[in-house]
Image (spheres, rainbow, N blue to C red):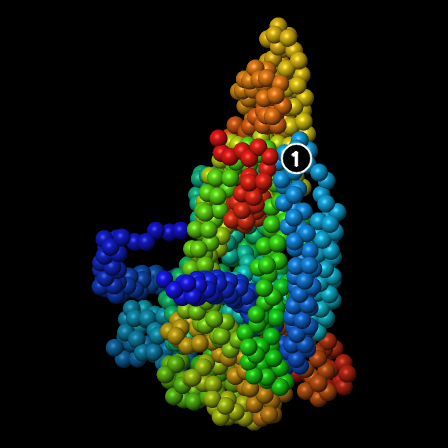
Amino acid sequence: MKRALSRREFMCRCALCGLGAAFAPAWLRSAAAAGEGAARRIPVSELKEAMFWQPEAGGLVRCLTCPNECRREEGAVTTCRTRINRGGRLYTLTYGKPCVVFADPLEKNPLYHVAPGSEAIGVATAGCNLRCLYCQNWNFSQSGPWETKNMDLSPEALVQRVKDRKMKWMTFSYTEPVAYYEYALDAAKAAKRAGVKTAVVTAGYIHPKPLEELIANCDAFSVTLKGYTDDFYKRIVGCPLNKVWETITALDRAKRWVEVVTLVVPTLNDEESGLRALARSLAKLNKDIPLHFLRFSPAWKLANLPPTPVPTLERAQAIAREEGLRFVYLANLPGHQGANTVCPSCKTLLVERVGFKVLRNGIQAGRCPSCRAVIPGVDL
Amino acid sequence: MNARWVAGCIVALGLVVSRVAAAEADAEARFRQLERDIPSLYLLNGLFLTPEQNDKLAGLLKETSDLEARTQDQILAFERQHANDLGRAIERQAQKAAGMSRPPKPDASVRDVVQRVRALHDEQDGKLKELSAKACGMLTPAQREILDGFKPCFIPPRNFRDPVRVGQAKNDTGFGEKAFDKLRAVPESQLGLARQRALEFIVPYLMDKRRIPYSEEARDQVSKEISANLDAALPTIHGLNDVDFELEKSALVEQVMPIEGAVTPVRSDLEETMWKTAVYVLNPGILGVVRGRGTAQAAAAPAYVPPQRGEIKQARDRMATARVLRKLGLTSSQIGQILPVIRGGAAARGKIETEALTLEKQALEPYEQLRKELAAQTPSEDAEEESLKLHRQVKELDEVDLVEALRPYENELDKILTVSQVSVLTESGRDDRGPAPPPSPDPNAARERALQTLDRVRKMNTVEFQNSRQSVAAQFVESCVTEEESVDVISEAERAVQVMEKARGMSGTDYAGRKQDLAVELCPRRSGARPVAYGAKYLRGEPVAVLARSSNLLFTDAAARLLDEMVKRSPGRAGPP
């Protein structure tokens, strides 16, 4: 059994903690400043120019990749921490420099109607253009590339890895691809040339023109629709809601495969009326868009909230079905029947899943084997 | 003083004492039940049963609860019916064993009772297997996958990769990945040392995960396996570029340190699933929760009270204790010598048990809170941390502190007993998963040989004895020792010569009265403490020593009382020297 602390030891530890707390913010600020300073010293020849930006008076630049439209002076970094003004031009700091490389099932994104049971290699870099208070990957997404351990992986080398492992899909996931837009787009183009398909997992906060390029070169999208009110979006995510709806609408109109994901957070976006409004809007757009409800796990700045009760998620699923959506899932409850794909016409169980694993896929050439109803998706 | 008043006080005091004892037994029983309910509820929450499945499970749980209660009633009734006979038979045996060179064969009545109780348990096990099969049969393939992969632990660790926590992660490669990350960071010139260091962490980790009972041979076997795997993989681990390493590392970990290794598991996969179902799914303690999740959403049932096993356990332990004492073949002198050691050990155990009971009572509130939150499927980090802290403290008391407290008494006992008698005590000290121990030498056979040796030397003339005493002593000592025991043959042979001389110097009457004691004195003793026995549990990377089953039986108040009776009733009534 461990011995108790003596009074002296306790007082010493308290004093050390107090000193640490007093000096930590200053130390952290100076560390961050030193990091950004390092970004300013990278030779321009090693940087890739951003695609969507415009110069402004006084040597400023305005980024036009996402609606943040960050306007920055010389040497300053954008909100997403991945672009920098150097000599009056905007450059990306994360091109070919992922901090995460992974091989995961497509179901993890979640993408349930895209090549069920397939694995994909994916990348993510540091940075994000949003500030979701409950981000599970905050240690990458809320960091600049000077704060993460990065690898060298050109778009072509990434695609080669996919082909070497005889995989057919590549994904951009874990952090926001809009933050590493140029890298993602070039990789998607290289993949397309090589016969590899690309899935993009995004919060959808992107301008129309960059989105068009992604639509032209990528094959499937998982868009996180985090809530159903503008107030929620501004408070919890840090951007307006309408831009995300525009992205989902644009993807659907372009006939690109899209699945929508909503993380249900207790007390913030779990009201029945709101979930019903969300489902109704989505069904109005396209009843075949799969909607995934995810269970919230306490993280980062919302570590004080409880996990979403399972009955809340089950109710959300029922509501979404009542509003006419044909494919509604509970995606991160391994073992729950809510993760299975059921034929909306004859209710035959088509795909049985546990977690990210597909136990059984009964879809035949994109159709239900019982009633021959078309099951929408990609490579089913 | 008014006699009636005094009598009333005594009765009241007795009632209070018995109420306190009953309350403590209830607290302990409730603690044990909660220790089962909590992992059961994690598993239940992870299975996401439909309301219809919950209804079916509720039915099976009721059947299980009735089966347990019925079997316990039958066993209790049977043992009560035979309690007096049993008690007398056992004590008679132990007493006779004290006075004889070879104890009588076990009474047929004792054998019959033991067999009947065993048959009742086997019947219960058979029915439980049927119920387990029904429970498994109602699960979907996805749920069955969850159950098959479930590794029981009290509270599942928080794992970012798997936010829905059921049990320990099935194929958690995190530990190995961290080790390989460190190996990659080391310059080539220091790789040898880093590799050695990595093995020091990986080997105990893997033995723990594979649940291999610790022994030097087992450790060397695992070390050899992992060394070879690591040497083959090291060029890859060190040589891959960062990207390919990220993509390959979990596969590398599974290749170098597979959890399912060379050791044959105790149970097959199916048996393992059936066992988990019986313990964690068919736990009558969660019946109320299951009912509440059914189609009718029944109101909470009263807390489940498991059948009281205390009485049965006490009776069983008394029988087992008496069996051990019978096997030892103690002389009346030895009984007197070991009695204070047994009392000391029992007192040490009592102290640990009191401390454990205090912690268990303290744990009831946080456990109940966590259970409530699990029933609502929203366990909080605070409740989990508090419960886990207390669980670990109780576990450490039971598994580490108790062993440390009783080891000195084991060592004292080993000084009094012969080496063959100590072998009897240690033969049941190994984990069931370990290899079967070699059969221990019969202490009574050793004692008979000792008697024959003493009779022989008493018949020798002086010259014959002078010439042959060393060789006779050495031969006798060597005949009592197997490879496993640590005996200083030379010292013990010298001591044996002294005993033989003592025997030769006695009159015929004295010798006849004391020859059993002399025979025991002649038998060799261990020269050092008995080797530490380990099970398959590890604490912070170190194997946890286990007590021999005999120590759990002997260092108890029940054993002390039994020995007391034997001292009072045995012929010659020898006490401590």
Task: Write the residue at 51% across / 69% down.
Answer: B163
Task: Write the residue at 63% across / 47% down.
Answer: B320
Callout 1 secondary element: loop
Q: Residue furthest front?
A: B2
Looking at the rendered structure, the kind of residue marked 1 is Ser
Question: Nearest the camera: A285 or B457?
Answer: B457
Say if B509 sits above or below B286 in the image: above
User: Which picture quadrant has residue B566?
Assistant: top right
Left or right: B445 as drawn, with respect to B30 = right
Is residue B155 among the parts visible in the rendering?
no
Task: Write the residue at 56% across / 83% down.
Answer: B299
Counting from the top left corner in percent of width and height, residue A288 is at 62, 87
Give the labeled residue for mark 1: B440
Instruction: Using the image, name the chain to which the residue with label 1 belongs.
Output: B
Question: Nearest the camera: B112 or B4?
Answer: B4
Q: Residue furthest right?
A: A370
Counting from the top left corner in percent of width and height, residue B362 is at 42, 64
If the image is split into quadrants, where does the N terminus of chain B sit?
bottom left
Counting from the top left corner in percent of width and height, residue B550 is at 58, 44
